[in-house]
Amino acid sequence: MKDLTFVLANAQQVTRSVGFAIIQFEKYLTIDEVVFSEPGEMLILGAHTLEGLNLRIEPRTKKLELAGPILAATPTRAHLASPLHRATQRPRREVRT
């Protein structure tokens, strides 16, 4: 854990402890860096944590719901043609028939 100083919207500076936490909501689980609040302060679930849980807030009902499929990047043709990509590939063996 470490202590960091934050500037609030009213320009007040506060120091809070920051560390890692395991966060679970129903069957969803993630690990995230969190700021530990003082007693009486507002508890906030941030966008980074929601993404880690793969949840989103439904705007009409204001309830958490599954965000849907997690998008993944795939290489482009330009990436596959780059010298760096070719340098990391093992040479192909020629098969004789």
Image (cartoon, rainbow, N blue to C red):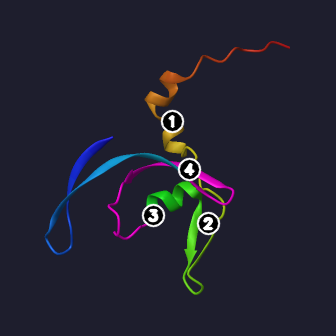
Residue 75 visible at all: yes
Q: SS of the residue at dot 2?
A: loop
Q: In the drawing, what numbered circle is on residue 47?
A: 3
Residue 72 visible at all: no
Q: Tell me the kind of residue under disc 3.
A: Ala
**Tags 4 and 3 in contact by the CB under 8 Å rule?**
no
**x and y percentages locating residue 41 in the rendered image:** 34, 69
- Residue that mark 4 sits on: 30
Q: Nearer the viewer, residue 28 or 94?
A: 28
Q: Going by the image, does 28 lie left or right of 2?
A: right
**Tags 1 and 4 in contact by the CB under 8 Å rule?**
no
Foreground mark, 1 or 2, reads 2
Q: Nearer the viewer, residue 82 or 14?
A: 14
Magenta region, residue range: 23-46
Q: Could you give the CA–CA distance between mark 2 and mark 4, rounded to whole angstroms?
A: 14 Å
Disc on the earlier residue, 1 or 4: 4
**x and y percentages locating residue 10 in the rendered image:** 17, 75
**Residue drawn 55% across and 44% down?**
77
Q: Could you give the CA–CA distance between mark 4 and mark 3, rounded to whole angstroms?
A: 13 Å
Q: Going by the image, does 45 lie left or right of 58?
A: left
Disc on the earlier residue, 1 or 3: 3
**x and y percentages locating residue 13 in the rendered image:** 15, 63
User: Exactly how many numbered labels are in the figure?
Assistant: 4
Residue 43's image quarter? Answer: bottom left
**Residue drawn 48% across and 58% down?**
49
- Residue that mark 2 sits on: 67
Above or below — where is 17 with respect to 69? above
Q: Judge the density around disc 4: few (<14), some (14-19), many (≥20) Cα neighbours within 10 Å.
A: some
Foreground mark, 2 or 4, reads 4
- Residue furthest right as drawn: 97
- Residue that mark 1 sits on: 81
